[in-house]
Image (spheres, helix red, strand yellow):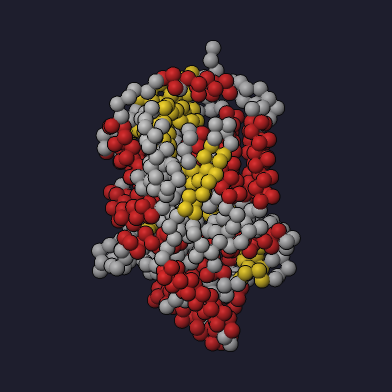
Amino acid sequence: MMAIDTEWRDYDVIVVGSGGAGAQAASVAAEEGARVLVVSKDPIGCSDTKISEGIATVRASGADDDTEEGLSVNLRMGGGDLNVAAITDAFAEDSQAGYDRLRTQGLRPSIDAERHTPQSLPLPLGGHTKRRSVGHKNSGIAFGHASWHAVIQESRIDYLEDAWLLDLVTEETGAAESAPSRRVVGGLVYDASRGLLVAVRAPAVVIAAGGLSTLFFPKTDTMRGNTGDGYAVAARAGAELVDMEQVQFLPFCLASPPSYEGLCAGEPVTASFLGVLRDRNGKIILDGVYLRTRAECSAAIMRAVEAGNGSPNGGAYLDMTANKKQPLSGPYFMRFLQTCLPSAYNNARQALGKAAGKCEVEWEVRPGAHYQMGGIRADEHGAAVGGDGAGDTALGIAGLFAAGQAMGGVFGANRLGSTALTENVVFGTRAGRAAAETARASRAAPDDAAFAPLIAETVKRFGQKGGEAGSALKLELQRESWDCIGPVRTAARIDRMASLIGEWRTRLDRVSIPVHAVWNQAFVEFAELRNMLETAEAVATAARERDGSVGGHVRLDGRNISAFSTPYSTVVRRDADGGYRVRRVARPRQPLKRLVSYKMQENWRKLQVKMLLMMPKGMQDKKLEKRYRAIMGASGKAPEIVPGGAEGAVGEATRA
């Protein structure tokens, strides 16, 4: 008797993931007439979207002259021109309509009484050049509820919770050389709650399964289900992955106590005008913190650790005491700190104590994995693509789509503040619509024989004998991922990671899995570990190819890649032997005039910092008081700052 039975189902579209992107993909596909199955490891709507700060980019919400072109260029400038222009254009074109869609699903912003638009925050956030970030009182919970509504209110949507998509099933198309040679015919799902394998026939699949940050647990602030599943199943099916080395790390996460480890304690802007980073000896390792990028701050911390000067828990100290000590501006700073990113401030106050909450002592901080900017290589509709050209649609997998963190090409080397929630609805909508169109056009019935090898291989795993535990191997992988492909990297460490991955792959076949089918946790650990290994290898392969530092990728043994050099994306693809091949795909660079203007503004801001620090203390205090008043207005309350960019309200105030 088989250890686990197989149930067969037929749908038009499978959507993997039920967070912000997956919910929209499923909802739109159903509206287009498709029969949809949502496969979700967690309860419907429980995702990074739900635990976010709940701030979304809505073009022209705060400025009438906020054009689509301006937003698209802003995204590419922030992303080091690794972004795909057609994708950033789509983001800019659809941000308003996407946000309106969320409002029909229950999202309720405050409304600007004069402009009759959603109320944007008072100043541009996280690298934006215009006011276009809209906050919500219930933060990410409001978006999580909208995701839940989007799924459960559609009669054409079925869903499986506590379910894992194990792999895609594809078959050859027999198409011409310029067309995709393979197409999706479905996927195999482990339904843990019922103890079944579910073989789902479907001509279209949307991968919206979140990111990879659990590779670095506990040094992450994201959901624990982010085990790189979307990247792994797509890669095993033959899809290309783009810019996988671009992992975004928040620099100021908590290093202790264990119950708070990895939680966000602030952004570079949190440091305000006088905040600095210090090593264990009290030496300043980075000043002007509020104007720095996340990568700069993370690199400074990890360089101190590498030199043996890190804090007891492998980080450094964020010192904001100079802000607090100012007689006039100090009280404004404290109100700014408490209100600009309230959840992060509360994390720090609760974890580090009253003195830290009053900024009377330094905060021990350490980087934490936050967001994956690379992903499945796709076009502006989320369809998987391939080939050497930036916009080439050849060599993709017909019927495979991506959205959310699973999709690459949106943010390049850096994600601007408040853009993730908008990305979810824009590309979830586009991918869902395109998937439904693919299903309508499909005429060929899938051959059930295509499922047979995968089913047989999976069934054999139940009852697998061996002396290894998947959970123990996962802990090893997480420790080594932090050291080798974490916030700082070297060629030697990347090579070490590749060697270790080879060893872990061998040990994977010796993981002990009991024979029972219902909620087999050992099998779940095995499946997630397998995906994490695939994802780690993709990241390592891309990181080895990019031998300099740009955006979220920091090479201690390489140069900083100039904004004036020719940008390129890394593209990795799994070969027939299970290894990864990498190549570079050139991207167009911004016009020289625009780049020069950008660098001049950046240098001017840094010069202002030096001038401020050279002022006599009394004059400095008065200057700072004036700036805080400009930021906080008559209410004496700071605008909220969303994780996601180099600058926030304080940085913008220095430009005025």
Q: Judge from the rendering whether residue 157 lies leftward or rightward of residue 652; answer left or right.
A: left
Residue at image location 58% in from the left, 59% down from the top? 549
Q: Position of residue 643 (x, y in %)?
A: 48, 59
Q: Is residue 334 visible?
A: no
Q: Is residue 613 visible?
A: yes
**Quadrant where the image shows the N terminus:** top right
In this orientation, which residue lies closer to the viewer: 237 or 536?
237
Residue at image location 34% in from the left, 52% down from the top? 90
Q: Position of residue 392 (x, y in %)?
A: 39, 45
In this orientation, which residue lies closer to the viewer: 309 or 352?
309
Q: Judge from the rendering whether residue 191 lies leftward or rightward of residue 393; answer left or right.
A: right
Q: Residue furthest front?
A: 177
Q: Quadrant of residue 355?
A: bottom right
Residue at image location 31% in from the left, 53% down from the top? 94
Q: Quadrant of residue 286?
A: bottom right
**How many numbered callouts?**
0
Residue at image location 30% in from the left, 29% down from the top? 442
Q: Position of residue 153 (x, y in %)?
A: 30, 38
In this orientation, which residue lies closer to the viewer: 576 or 185?
576
**Quadrant where the image shows the C terminus:** bottom left
Q: Is residue 101 above or below residue 182?
A: below
Q: Judge from the rendering whether residue 474 lies leftward or rightward of residue 240; answer left or right.
A: right
Q: Position of residue 621 (x, y in %)?
A: 54, 83
Q: Is residue 438 above or below residue 323?
A: above
Q: Residue furthest top?
A: 1
